[in-house]
């Protein structure tokens, strides 16, 4: 079997499962404009392959992205020529400029390992905001809404290629272990199988809100969102506190 990088099939799978990147970007824009009508610049942190960033580009005058994974970064830069997409870790990145909006989609915030790292991450977000700027974060599940042992699967056929995705989620202390298998069947290249495992933190709602406040932001939790996990929406009021 040949090796198929997961980044190459990532968007293919999620679009095939019905992920509406453009619709989610419009929902975020509505949340932002209700709080900052003049918003024109946006930074998408943990932008992945740039699917949301592509949609944000049509809604804001200037957009940039930050991504840690080299594979995801390569795809994002290919899909978004002319858009700055930076290599960086959400816990300590520094772009040297500020934006009207900072977003973190697809529950990527859950990849930080502790409350201390969550606080450091929100401080970085706030440090990249103009005063009065807006942070929009799609969280992972809370401890009382996470379904231990949850499994899901999908098969997507695009052109001649077929991609299957299977996942299993289990509680491990204060985190969830998400194991994902991808199988790609291509008529010329053959079969490929890749496995990824993530540890995603199960932060309490109050822990998110405290991290926003520690970063100098007012915060509210808005129910709904793409998967029912809601949104945290913060507004920078003061100079962010220095990192510990």
Image (cartoon, helix red, strand yellow):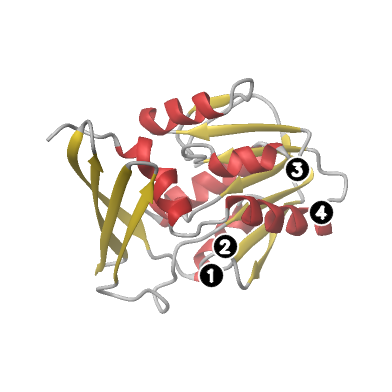
User: Label 3 near label 2: C-beta < 8 Å?
Assistant: no
Task: Give the structural element (helix, strand or loop) at label 2.
Answer: helix
Mark 2 crowd level (few <14, some 14–19, many ≥20, 10 Å Cα): some
In the rendered structure, which disc, 1 or 4, sits on the residue that comes first in sequence?
A: 4
Q: Nearer the viewer, mark 1 or mark 4?
A: 4
Q: Please give the label number shown on residue 33.
A: 4
Gap between marks 1 and 2 measured at Cα: 6 Å
Distance Cα–Cα, label 2 vs label 3: 30 Å
Q: Of circles 3 and 1, which is in front?
A: 3
From the viewer's side, name the closer residue of 225 and 88.
Answer: 225
Residues under labels 4 and 2: Cα distance? 24 Å
Q: Can you tell which quarter of the image residue 240 is in?
A: top right
Q: Residue at x 43, y 25 (%)?
A: 74
Q: Which residue is mark 2?
A: 210
Q: Is residue 241 visible?
A: no
Q: Which residue is mark 3?
A: 59
């Amino acid at each position: 079997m040949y090796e198929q990088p997961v980044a190459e099939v990532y968007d293919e799978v999620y679009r095939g499962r019905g992920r509406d990147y453009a619709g989610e970007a419009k929902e975020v824009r509505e949340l932002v404009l209700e709080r900052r009508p003049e918003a024109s610049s946006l930074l998408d942190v943990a932008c992945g392959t740039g699917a949301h960033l592509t949609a944000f580009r049509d809604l804001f005058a200037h957009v940039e992205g930050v991504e840690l994974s080299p594979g995801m970064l390569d795809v994002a830069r290919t899909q978004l020529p002319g858009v700055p997409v930076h290599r960086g870790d959400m816990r300590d990145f520094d772009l040297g400029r500020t934006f009207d909006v900072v977003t973190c989609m697809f529950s990527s915030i859950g990849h930080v390992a502790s409350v201390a790292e969550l606080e450091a991450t929100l401080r970085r977000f706030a440090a990249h905001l103009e005063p009065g700027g807006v942070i929009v974060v799609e969280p992972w599940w809370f401890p009382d809404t996470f379904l231990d042992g949850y499994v899901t699967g999908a098969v997507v056929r695009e052109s001649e290629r077929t991609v299957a995705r299977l996942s299993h989620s289990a509680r491990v202390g204060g985190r969830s272990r998400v194991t994902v298998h991808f199988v790609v069947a291509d008529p010329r290249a053959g079969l490929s199988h890749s496995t990824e495992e993530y540890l995603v933190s199960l932060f309490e709602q109050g822990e998110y809100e405290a991290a926003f406040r520690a970063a100098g932001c007012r915060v509210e939790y808005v129910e709904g969102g793409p998967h029912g996990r809601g949104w945290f929406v913060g507004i920078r009021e003061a100079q962010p506190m220095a990192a510990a």
